[in-house]
Image (cartoon, rainbow, N blue to C red):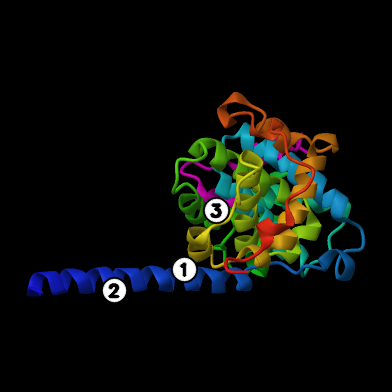
Amino acid sequence: MTSLMLIQTTMIHNFALHLLVISTDIYIAETKKRPSTDFMEKIQKDINASMRSILIDWLVEVAEEYHLVPDTLYLTVNYIDRYLSGNEINRQRLQLLGVSCMLIAAKYEEICAPQVEEFCYITDNTYFMDEVLQMEADVLKYLKYEMTAPTVKCFMRRFIRAAQGSDEVPALQLEFLASYVAEISLLEYSLLCYAPSLIAASAIFLAKFILQPAKRPWNATLDHYTLYKPSDISDCVKALHRLFCTSSGNNLPAIREKYSQHKYKFVAKKYCPASIPAEYFQDAGN
């Protein structure tokens, strides 16, 4: 082997190790930036999971109105849940918390974030500018200005590339369908028990199953890139499957209507089989 070839091989090896370190770091970071899974029971007295769902459904509409990137929505929900994990709030201020968290997330993610006046306007001027700014300050202080957080969307970008490695299913349909599944998970307080990376992997599993019910959704490539085996994501996939099957009948339509549009290939209208074969959750070699 020539010196040049040796250098190139070493560089490729080091780059691969660097990618592995990045991957490991993001899994560690997600555990540090996750909200409590029981704040409704232990911290909150005047709000409940249903109110949280209604708020997030409305924030989806706000994000669509202002053409915000998906990361802004996911970060907004992360900030809301982390704040509620340690601060009791009354129902009259829940929407204020929502717009303030979206203001912070938009400043973090958007090239041109909406101004604070626009967030006041979107609430029919229920809150004044100084109230939004004060809540923004309270959230930033409580979160100790730690605004970077690995969300489902962060993991989805990596995982979807691995899932699109073959030409068996249309790439855009898979991406949009997995995104729809991941987004409806934001509404469910009960799903906070699952890590963002686990929800991302489960959303891709379910999307692949819906598009090709007769074929095993998981493979060695997804094992490698997600670090999850089918048995690891079984419970979460089943929870998302129930959510998908009942989404057409709930009274929170924003996400469903969003993904029922032509630009998202009407993925919210996809038929989903009533059950997932148990063998699809068996790990390779079992």
Is disc 2 placed on a helix, strand or loop? helix
Give the amino acid at mark 3: Met
Q: Which residues are magenta?
A: 104-125
Which residue is depicted at the point 46% across and 50% down?
161
Q: Which residue is mark 3?
A: 156
| Up/down of 183 relative to 32, above or below | above
Q: Which residue is mark 2?
A: 14
- Along the horizontal axis of the image, is 237 left or right of 190? left
Is disc 1 placed on a helix, strand or loop? helix
Is disc 3 placed on a helix, strand or loop? helix
- Along the horizontal axis of the image, is 190 left or right of 27? right
Disc 3: CA contacts within 10 A as few (<14), some (14-19) or many (>=20): many
Give the spatial CA distance, label 2 vs label 3: 25 Å
Q: Which residue is mark 1?
A: 23
N-terminal of the pair, mark 3 or mark 1, is 1
N-terminal of the pair, mark 2 or mark 3, is 2
